Image (spheres, rainbow, N blue to C red):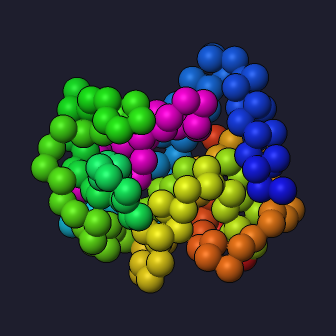
Amino acid sequence: MKRRLRTEFEERRISRSFPVRQRAAADLAEWIYSAPFRLEYDVTVAAYIPFGAEPGSPALLDALIDRGVTVLVPAVPGGEPTTLDWVRYDGADSLTRGRWGLLEPTGERLGTDAVRAASVVFVPAYAVDKSGTRLGRGAGYYDRTLIGLAADVVAVVFDDEVVESLPAAPHDVRVGWVLTPGGGFRELG
C-alpha cells in the first residue's frame, strides 16, 4: 500500500511544471519569516536539501540563516547507515553531490546525535495526514533519526499532499506540524 502511494505522489510531483515548483519553493521560504517557532540567534534547526521534485529549495535554508539560526542538514554516512549524519549548512555554495547524488554540505560531519540540539526539524515527506502520520521514501532514515527528539517536527509537502489518513507502521514517528506553500504552518493531531 505504501509503495503504491509513494509512486502516485512521486508521479504527481513530477507532473508539476518547473515554474509551479519554483513558486512553491519561494512560498515555503517566505513562510519561515512567520514561523510559529522561536527562530533566533541561539536556536539550532535541522532541515533537508530537497531532492528531485521534493518541495522546497535551498532558499528555505537561506531564510533560516537570515533569521540567525544555526542550520543542520543531513549527510548520508557510508556503508550501511541506520541514521543520518549532520553537517552545518553555510549556504548553497557549500553544497556538493554526496552519496546517491544527494546535495550535502562540504563541512565537518557532526555525527548522528548533532540533531538533538535542534529545536525544530523540517523533514521531507510524500504526504502527511491530519494526525501527523508521514509517508516518507521508505528507507526509515528519518524515523530512526526522530525517535526521542524533543524538537517540533515539521513535514514539508505540497498543499494537496495533506490528506485525511495514511497507513502507519508501528515504527513510524508522527510529526506535529506541516508546512505547505499555500497554507503555511499548521499544527497536526
- Above or below 135: residue 143: below
Residue 136 image position (x, y, % from top left): 62, 54
Task: Judge by depth and name the residue closer to the eye, 112 or 125.
Answer: 112
Position of residue 116 relative to residue 95, above or below, is: below
- The image shows residue 106 at horizontal and vertical percentages of 18, 38
Residue displayed at 29% across by 58% down: 85
Indicate left or right for 177 with 60 as reference. right
Q: Is residue 25 visible?
A: no
Q: Nearer the viewer, residue 114 or 83?
A: 83
Please provide the residue range marked out in magenta: 47-72
The answer to if 22 sits in the magenta stretch is no
Residue at x-position 37% and y-position 42%: 61
Furthest residue in direction left, as rendered: 108
Residue 19 appears in which quarter of the rendering? Answer: top right
**How far across and down, in percent of the image, does residue 47 sit?**
40, 52
Q: Is residue 3 left or right of residue 186?
A: right
In the foreground, 118 or 135: 135
Which quadrant would residue 49 be assigned to in this image? top left
Count the marks. Answer: 0
